[in-house]
Image (tube, rainbow, N blue to C red):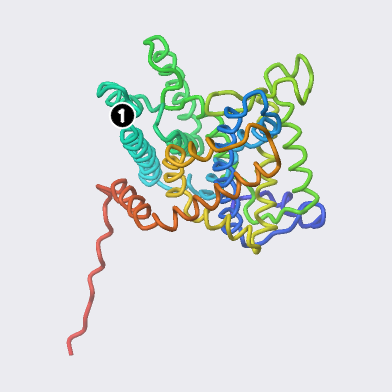
Amino acid sequence: MARISKAGRDLVAAHPRLLGTWDDNSAQTQEVARGYMIVFVFYTHAMLGVAAHLGPNAWLVLFQLKYVVPGISAFFLLSGMSAPNMAKKGFEPILRMSLALLLFAVTSHLGGWLIMLAGQAYATPFEAAKALVRPLVFGIGYEGFIGWFFLSLAIARILAYVFLRNWLAFVPLVLVIIAAVWLSKRLGLPDNIYEWRNWPAATLFFLIGMRFPRGWRISNAVGLPAFALSLVLALVNRHGIWRTGPCFTCDMHFQSEAMYGKYGSILVYVPQQLLFAIFMLWLAQRTAPTLVGRTASFFGRSSLPILLMHGWVLLTIYPGILSGMPSYETPYLFVGIMCTAIVIHAVLYAILRNPLDWIQARIFAISRIGQARARPRARHTQAA
């Protein structure tokens, strides 16, 4: 369990109805919460297509996107929660896990590129070769889109590790990164090379997740207000909020997107995502025994291969779904998209589970190449 001050634990224990209690189901809670986040990813990517399809008729879609699009930072927080003792390990296992995540990004891109190639998306062989090589060199523009998350998480893990092990080494590392970004701009390299705009938020929320109180069973008095406040902050967050004041409808097309460095106001974005993460954990705790919670657990238990598959689903199945939609919003449209996305991914993963698990196993095997194996202990046998 993550270290928490005795005063903090005593405070929670003294007010169980207000703040909650402690339990030992942290791993299950994280699994369910991770599953909900993956379902939100399915839904968010569909809603982005719906917004483009509806054009000026999109209104409720934009409200939803303002809330769900920023939620990716909560994903990094959940990732940090699963690695509370990472700083106590040597650098080699941290590097190997980040290497595995980079291989997931490469695999996602290669699969997406093959899908695009089969669909004759490239006009010339040169364009096809460029689409294949450019993302591998510059770490941006992956086919299948999901690669950016694997890359950002890989970098965030290393930065968080260095910060916790030796913050004096972290400072010059950050200065080197800033200089490298500046140099890339001077050389005319692609913007957001290696998804660097997402590194600050990803690292921050990963660190927060590592220190998040595991085992805290969040009370309704905390979970419900966390949802309400996170919703309000997401709707009002935009550039210039401190000059013009809060407004729910002033910039409906703005969504906080850390991957592009679009935070709106960072002073609004960070607490909004913290509250959103608390709400997600509360929801996971309350629904874990239910059918909904078990469905989320199904996705959360196999998050890496399902996210890998989702990138390819975006290129193959999602365009066909969006082409058959009406040109106006209805509640049935949103419910239908959510249910369809869940069913499609569940069925596809059930069908493709073996090859996806094989890919995941090969990725981790490659990341462990060169790892020293523990020598087997000599067996001492007694002569008869």
**Depth check, front residue: 285 or 383:** 285
Does residue 126 appear left or right of residue 258 in this picture?
Answer: left
Residue 339: horizontal and vertical position, in percent? 60, 50
Residue appearing at x 65%, y 42% in the figure: 334
Q: Secondary structure at mark 1?
A: helix
Looking at the rendered image, the quarter that the N terminus falls into is bottom right
Please give the count of numbered marks on the rendered protein.
1
- Image-quadrant location for residue 119: top left
- Is 305 positioned to the left or the right of 47 in the image? left
5 or 34, which is in the foreground?
Answer: 34
Q: Quadrant of the C terminus?
A: bottom left
Q: Residue 135, relative to residue 310: is it above or below? A: above
Q: Provide residue 183's location: percent of width, then percent of height.
A: 40, 13
User: For the residue marked with disc 1, what is the amino acid?
Assistant: Leu
Relative height, residue 166 to residue 278 (above, below): above
List the residue tagged with mark 1.
Answer: 132
Please give left or right for residue 341 compared with residue 248 in the image.
Answer: left
- Outermost residue to the left: 383
Instruction: Give the farthest residue toward the bottom.
Output: 384
Residue 3 in the image: state x and y as whole percent: 61, 50
Q: Are there few (<14), some (14-19), or many (20+) residues within 10 Å of tag 1?
A: many
- Residue at figure coordinates x 71%, y 42% from the top left: 331
Left/right of residue 282 with respect to residue 173 in the rendered view: right
The image shows residue 259 at horizontal and vertical percentages of 52, 28
Occupied quadrant, residue 67:
top right
* Depth order, front residue of 101/129: 129
Which of the two residues, 235 or 47, is positioned nearer the viewer here? 47
